Image (cartoon, rainbow, N blue to C red):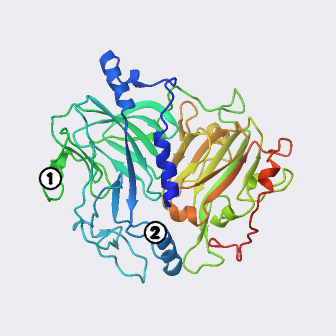
């Protein structure tokens, strides 16, 4: 992921919610003192930027993938606020699903050499608790490839917000954070005074300083039975997991519908499908698509969609002709046997439901409701910016067109995004309600760019 994209995601953390917005903290406790302590924790919130790190930059990885067909999912470290260590594969994990893992714990494509690995002893991020009763943390996964699981040893966490805003709080041992997603958590600091570890992530010491004299930072010792997240990414059966993408918003915001008597009815339904096809120009990498055709990166150098004539017919993968006020459903099916996080820009959408390893049960949401599907939530679904599309399964987003804008929905895994898995959306811009672009903007100097082969890399 580019540095600009990372800063764009991380920068949003520093925009605090308005003091006028209702908080859900009274659902956690009705004790006046504790509510003041929680409010103080919000004012003094700390940000943890989580990213997968490779000792090569994004351009190098893309060029190697293009030239050799190398993988694009293997990384050296997970960093928190830029700190962390190289973690090599643990000896007991040498195969996964019958395939050999190299020293980094990666599966290399046929014909490519295994990667070597050397463990490092760099420092971890340290979070100061300052003797407080409560602490609030923003956890932002900007790795743009992998989801992460986070737990704090000896502590429960309470999820209070996601990308879309405040949610009905939920207490859990483990947090699932998809790529490009954020959760805000509250931690009650009532464990025994000691160091508490966030496995592979951070440390939460009670002390204000950790003096060290040339020695590597020591990690706190934790009994194996108290660790919730296992080395293979699994979770102990006695540990609960919370997902911000599944928790209802606070205050309640039920999804809109096109009919009061039929909650499943939308004005417009678009059936999308995440898949791949051979590239027209590249030997080793395919093209990925979301709405039948890939949306290549070179479109960023061409005429902006907002500048097109209002009566011009726009072809797929562009989604257009969405009138102001319309309720829109995106039913997304996954042809790929891998969970893919999707980022829908603009206002948050309602995440009505998802299921893995099956087709969507109907042509529309109302069809699925009429067939007695139990997989959709039309009462109190989560509001999301990012959601997971299950492997070989489906998901449904609903949104209402409230303004004229160009947005986009795209995969939040870099190789899928870079290779075309996106669909631009023109909201509220129709022949009857065109957008007015100032001539001073339209007539600015620009370069006439024409792709040579219409391939992903232009």
* Residue 346 in the image, given as x and y percentages of width and height: 62, 43
Residue 55: name its quadrant.
Answer: bottom left
* Residue 224 in the image, given as x and y percentages of width and height: 17, 50
Q: Which numbered disc, 1 or 2, marks the residue closer to the eye?
A: 1
Q: Nearer the viewer, residue 314 or 59?
A: 59
Per the image, label 2 sits on a secondary structure element best described as loop
Q: For mark 2, what is the residue?
A: 72
Mark number, residue 212: 1
Q: Residue furthest bottom?
A: 111
Determine the residue positioned at 47% across, 73% down: 60
Residue 173: name its quadrant.
Answer: top left
Instruction: Specify which label sits upstream in the sequence, 1 or 2.
Output: 2
Q: Nearer the viewer, residue 216 or 248?
A: 216
* Residue 421 in the image, given as x and y percentages of width and height: 60, 61
Q: Residues within 10 Å of mark 2 (few under 14, many from 20)?
A: some
Determine the residue positioned at 53% across, 77% down: 66
Q: Is 17 rendered above or below residue 396?
A: above
Q: Residues within 10 Å of mark 1 (few under 14, many from 20)?
A: few
Per the image, label 1 sits on a secondary structure element best described as loop
Q: Is 158 rendered above or below residue 422?
A: above
Q: CA distance from mark 1 to mark 2?
A: 37 Å
Q: Is 386 rendered above or below residue 184?
A: below
Q: Is residue 410 visible?
A: yes
């Amino acid at each position: 992921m580019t540095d600009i994209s990372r800063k764009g995601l991380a920068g949003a953390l520093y925009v605090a919610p308005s003091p006028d917005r209702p908080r859900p903290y009274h659902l956690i406790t009705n004790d006046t003192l504790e509510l003041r302590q929680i409010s103080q924790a919000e004012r003094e919130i700390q940000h943890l930027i989580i990213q997968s790190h490779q000792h090569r930059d994004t351009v190098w990885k893309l060029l190697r993938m293009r030239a050799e067909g190398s993988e694009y999912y293997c990384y050296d470290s997970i960093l928190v606020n830029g700190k962390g260590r190289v973690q090599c594969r643990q000896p007991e994990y040498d195969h996964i699903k019958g395939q050999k893992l190299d020293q980094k714990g990666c599966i290399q494509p046929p014909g490519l050499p295994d990667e070597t690995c050397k463990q490092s002893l760099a420092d971890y991020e340290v979070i100061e608790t300052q003797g407080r009763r409560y602490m609030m943390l923003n956890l932002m996964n900007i790795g743009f490839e992998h989801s992460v699981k986070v737990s704090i040893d000896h502590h429960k966490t309470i999820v209070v917000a996601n990308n879309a805003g405040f949610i009905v709080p939920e207490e859990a041992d483990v947090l699932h954070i998809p790529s490009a997603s954020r959760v805000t958590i509250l931690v009650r600091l009532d464990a025994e005074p000691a160091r508490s570890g966030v496995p592979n992530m951070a440390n939460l010491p009670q002390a204000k300083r950790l003096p060290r004299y040339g020695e590597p930072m020591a990690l706190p010792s934790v009994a194996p039975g108290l660790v919730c997240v296992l080395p293979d990414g699994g979770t102990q059966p006695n540990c609960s997991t919370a997902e911000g993408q599944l928790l209802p918003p606070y205050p309640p915001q039920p999804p809109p519908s096109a009919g009061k008597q039929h909650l499943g009815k939308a004005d417009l339904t678009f059936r999308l499908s995440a898949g791949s096809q051979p590239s027209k120009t590249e030997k080793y990498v395919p093209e990925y698509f979301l709405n039948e055709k890939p949306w290549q990166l070179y479109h960023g150098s061409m005429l902006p969609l907002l500048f097109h004539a209002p009566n011009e017919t726009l072809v797929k993968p562009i989604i257009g002709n969405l009138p102001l006020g319309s309720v829109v459903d995106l039913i997304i099916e996954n042809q790929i046997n891998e969970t893919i996080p999707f980022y829908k820009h603009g206002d948050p959408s309602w995440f009505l439901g998802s299921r893995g390893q099956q087709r969507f049960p109907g042509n529309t949401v109302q069809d699925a409701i009429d067939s007695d599907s139990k997989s959709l939530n039309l009462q109190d679904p989560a509001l999301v910016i990012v959601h997971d599309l299950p492997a070989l399964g489906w998901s449904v987003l609903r949104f209402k067109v409230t303004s004229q804008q160009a947005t986009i929905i795209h995969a939040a895994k870099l190789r899928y995004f870079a290779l075309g898995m996106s669909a631009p959306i023109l909201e509220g811009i129709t022949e009857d309600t065109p957008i007015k672009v100032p001539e001073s903007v339209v007539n600015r100097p620009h370069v006439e760019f024409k792709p040579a082969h219409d391939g992903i890399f232009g």
